[in-house]
Amino acid sequence: MKNIVGVKFKKEGKIYSFHAADLTLTRDDLVMVSTENGPAIGMVAAEVQAVPDEQLTANLKNVIRIASDDDLRTCENNRKLEQEAKQFCSRKIDERQLPMKLISVECLFDKSKVIFYFTAGNRVDFRELVKDLVQKFRTRIELRQIGARQEARIVKGLGICGREVCCAMLLQSLDRVSVKMAKEQNMSLNPEKISGLCGRLMCCLGYEYDGYLEMKKDMPKCGKPVQTPQGKGKVLRQNALQGEVVVILESGTEASFETKDVRRITPEGR
């Protein structure tokens, strides 16, 4: 058994598991941990739990210590360096007229590398820009291209619901969202109504998708012939929340029926 604690490095980020050893840690504690990119400061997001060795992930890293005042000062200095690096890089992008948009800059805790996140419509030849950055900051430089959803997560903003976008507030990972999810929930397929700030389908379309599938699994599908208390007809719409279907009867009138009062008509039963 090992004591495992959940740590995340950004408010909207994923929670990672670390070996806490004998440290006494509580939620929201700032800790110094070992990562593949060297030491980093994170926040405890899930309290310590004893986990059997066979359930541990490979290459489990350790919590080094609770973050000290010196660690926090180093972190603050890195934030200032990130601001300086962002301003410098943006200026060089304009001077070199590169077709890219700088979104964010991240400096590793030990300053061994500075990462520049950007968006672009196509591949960009930024070799000369990298030379400018290396000459200025004298450390390893990485330029990392990200997509529109990752950009919205970093930049943040308010969605059409009036709240901060979910990707920046509560989502740990950006799962795939499809038009099928909107169709299953009988939502308008107008792109302006189902797209987020990133221009992609809203993440919240996936929240209730499984619930709708569960509610609709026993409902006859649209276009299928059914037998109702008022005669035969064809399903026009499904109302999963009310457990009803709207049927156009052979007489040409529309009527709503509870799912339990409607029977599917098989080809042999026509």
Image: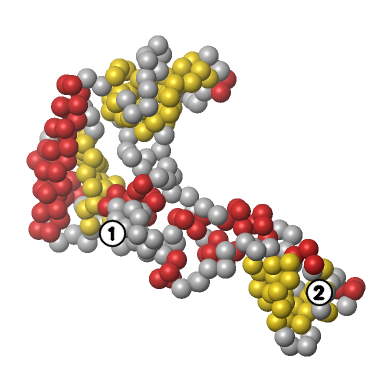
Residue under label 1:
120
Q: Is residue 70 left or right of residue 15?
A: left
Which residue of the protein is positioned furthest toward the top in this rendering? 22
Report the quarter where the C terminus lies.
bottom right
Q: Relative to the observer, which residue lies in front, 67 or 61?
A: 67
Instruction: Identify the element where label 2 is drawn.
Output: strand
Q: Amino acid at mark 1?
A: Ala
For label 1, the crowd category at 10 Å Cα-Cα, with few meaning under 14, some 14 to 19 and many 20 or more, is some
Residue under label 2:
228
CA distance separating discs 2 and 1: 56 Å
Mark before the other along the chain sequence, 2 or 1: 1
Q: Position of residue 166 (x, y in %)?
A: 39, 51
Which residue of the protein is positioned furthest toward the right in this rendering? 268
Residue 131 can be seen, yes or no: no
Q: Position of residue 89 (x, y in %)?
A: 14, 49
Q: Position of residue 27 (x, y in %)?
A: 37, 27
Give residue 130's mark: none
Image position of 17 with respect to 66: above or below: below
Q: What is the basis of the colouring in this image?
A: secondary structure
Judged by depth in the image, the label closer to the viewer, 2 or 1, is 2
Image position of 142 with respect to 219: above or below: above
Q: Position of residue 182 (x, y in %)?
A: 53, 64
Residue depicted at 30% across the width and 62% down the height: 121
Where is residue 158, by image quadrant? Answer: bottom left
Q: Is residue 110 left or right of residue 237?
A: left
Q: Relative to the observer, which residue lies in front, 228 or 226?
A: 228
Q: Relative to the observer, which residue lies in front, 224 or 124?
A: 224
Q: Is residue 140 left or right of residue 202?
A: left
Residue depicted at 49% across the width and 25% down the height: 58
Q: Amino acid at mark 2?
A: Thr
Image position of 210 with respect to 115: above or below: below
